[in-house]
Image: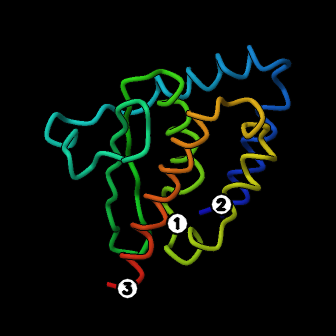
């Protein structure tokens, strides 16, 4: 499987094909609509991400090969799209690779840092922190 940086390059190329941020927002929303829905039981307090203005749930599934698979959902379209971006970057990778990845630099490269409201940026940071926490736990297991 390709690494996180390959996924970032692919996303950056897709974003570069889009013109302005209105088009990019539409694309992010489309990414979110393509997420597989979580079940009602997965939309639990245990899977809820704290620090997000919207409702956000993140499910972490350790795989037999040592990688982590992430699935997520939100009640907000743009946030669902941000989850989809995070899943493309992080899902299917080993905890060490996840922990070594600089998410802030990635969001800067994609232009997300400047395009998101501070509330959405904080929520995105909370989602990344949750992914990193789960990677730490998996690495320690």
| Element assignment for label 2 | helix
Q: How many residues crowd mark 1 within 10 Å: few (<14), some (14–19), many (20+)?
A: many
| Element assignment for label 3 | helix
**Residue 131 in the image: above or below residue 79:** below
Percent coordinates x, y for residue 54 in the rendering: 40, 30
Quarter of the figure that contains the C terminus: bottom left
| Element assignment for label 1 | loop
Q: Which residue is mark 2?
A: 4
**Mark 2 and 3 residues: CB-CB less than 8 Å, in contact?**
no
Q: How many residues crowd mark 3 within 10 Å: few (<14), some (14–19), many (20+)?
A: few
Q: Which residue is mark 3?
A: 140
Q: CA distance from mark 2 to mark 1?
A: 7 Å
Label located before the other in sequence (3 or 1): 1
Mark 2 vs mark 3, foreground winner is 3
Label located before the other in sequence (2 or 1): 2
Q: How many residues crowd mark 2 within 10 Å: few (<14), some (14–19), many (20+)?
A: many
Quarter of the figure that contains the N terminus: bottom right
Q: What residue appears at the point 74 percent right and 14 percent down from the top-left corner?
A: 22
Q: What residue appears at the point 85 percent right and 31 percent down from the top-left corner?
A: 16
Percent coordinates x, y for residue 5 in the rendering: 72, 60
Label located before the other in sequence (2 or 3): 2
Q: Which mark is residue 50?
A: none
Q: What residue appears at the point 81 percent right and 22 percent down from the top-left corner?
A: 18
**Mark 2 and 1 residues: CB-CB less than 8 Å, in contact?**
yes
| Left or right of residue 73: residue 32 | right
Q: CA distance from mark 3 to mark 1?
A: 16 Å
Q: Which mark is residue 93?
A: 1
């Amino acid at each position: 499987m390709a690494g996180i940086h390959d996924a970032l390059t692919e996303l950056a190329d897709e974003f570069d094909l889009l013109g302005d941020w209105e088009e990019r927002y539409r694309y992010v929303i489309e990414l979110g609509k393509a997420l597989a829905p979580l079940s009602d039981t997965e939309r639990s307090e245990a899977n809820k991400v704290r620090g997000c203005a919207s409702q956000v749930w993140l499910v972490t599934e350790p795989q037999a090969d040592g990688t982590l698979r992430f699935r997520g959902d939100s009640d907000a379209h743009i946030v669902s799209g941000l989850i989809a971006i995070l899943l493309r970057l992080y899902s299917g990778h080993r905890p060490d690779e996840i922990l070594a990845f600089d998410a802030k630099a990635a969001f800067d490269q994609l232009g997300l840092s400047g395009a998101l409201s501070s509330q959405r940026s904080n929520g995105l940071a909370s989602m990344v922190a949750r992914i990193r926490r789960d990677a730490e736990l998996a690495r320690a297991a």
